[in-house]
Image (tube, grey):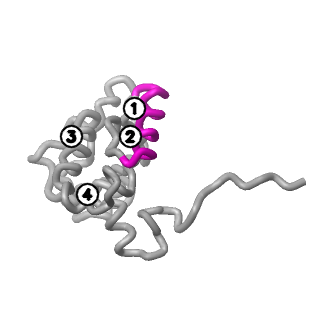
């Protein structure tokens, strides 16, 4: 899933307090504190559960290319991992989209201090079900257009 935001100002990450270089980063990966949380996220996704720990990468494209947004604003996205069939049914994305959007935004706000309602002009949660509906090649919301698996080495 991807949460897209139209913003007045770019996201300002709290991590800048101890690492000011984050303000120059294009792609930011956040949401987990340790490897156990990474495992938990993928276990939940593999079990068709909405993860308790949301983690993934995001960017503010307009920070490096101003054509991504109007001159007086920014656009940003966060792409946390999520299952295709939440609680065993992909239609739950449609039924509970607003709830999921609030959970994802709430987690993003923990890391970016300025993602308050005054800064956000628009928001859209693009779900795995949305991906599949718009492109039949992206089965089950797969962003890589097919199956990914380790190939056996041939010598």
How would you rate the neighbour count of disc 2 (Cα within 10 Å): few for under 14, some for 14-19, many for 20 or more? many
Q: Earlier in the sequence, mark 4 or mark 2?
A: 2
> Mark 4 or 2, which is nearer the eye?
4
Which residue is depicted at the point 72% across and 55% down?
Answer: 151
Residue that appears at 47% across and 62% down? 143
Name the magenta segment's main secondary structure. helix
| Residue toward you, 62 or 41 | 41
Pointer 2: what residue?
55
- Which residue is found at the position 14% from the left and 42% from the top? 116
Rendering coords of residue 109 (x, y %)? 22, 38
Marks counted in the figure total 4
Q: CA distance from mark 4 to mark 1?
A: 25 Å
Tags 1 and 2 touching, CB below 8 Å: yes
Give the spatial CA distance, label 4 vs label 2.
20 Å
Measured Cα–Cα span from mark 2 to mark 3: 12 Å
Mark 2 or mark 3: whose residue is earlier in sequence: 2
Tell me the tag on residue 92: 4
Residue 148 shown left or right of residue 84 in the figure: right
The tag earlier along the polypeptide, 1 or 3, is 1
Q: Is residue 140 left or right of residue 104?
A: right
Q: Secondary structure at mark 2?
A: loop
Instruction: Check residue 27 for magenta coloring.
Output: no
Q: Quadrant of residue 112?
A: top left
Q: Which residues are magenta?
A: 33-48
Q: x, y (%) of residue 152? A: 77, 53
**Residue on which the image places disc 3:** 106
Q: Residue at x 46, y 34 (%)?
A: 38
User: Mark 2–mark 3 contact, CB under 8 Å?
Assistant: no
Quote the CA–CA distance across marks 1 and 2.
Answer: 6 Å
122 shown above or below 145: above
Q: Would you name the residue on which mark 1 appears?
A: 32
Of the image marks 3 and 4, the number of the one nearer the N terminus: 4
């Amino acid at each position: 899933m991807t949460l897209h935001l139209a913003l007045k100002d770019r996201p300002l990450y709290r991590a800048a307090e101890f690492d000011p270089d984050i303000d120059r980063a294009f792609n930011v990966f956040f949401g987990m504190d340790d490897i156990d949380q990474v495992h938990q996220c993928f276990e939940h996704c593999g079990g068709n559960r909405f993860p308790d720990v949301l983690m993934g990468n995001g960017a503010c494209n307009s920070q490096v290319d101003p054509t991504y947004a109007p001159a007086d604003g920014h656009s940003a996205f966060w792409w946390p991992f999520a299952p295709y069939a939440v609680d065993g049914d992909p239609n739950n994305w449609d039924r509970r989209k607003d709830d999921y959007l609030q959970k994802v935004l709430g987690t993003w706000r923990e890391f970016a201090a300025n993602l308050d309602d005054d800064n956000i002009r628009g928001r859209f949660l693009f779900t795995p079900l949305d991906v599949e509906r718009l492109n039949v090649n992206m089965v089950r919301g797969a962003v890589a257009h097919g199956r990914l698996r380790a190939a056996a080495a041939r010598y």
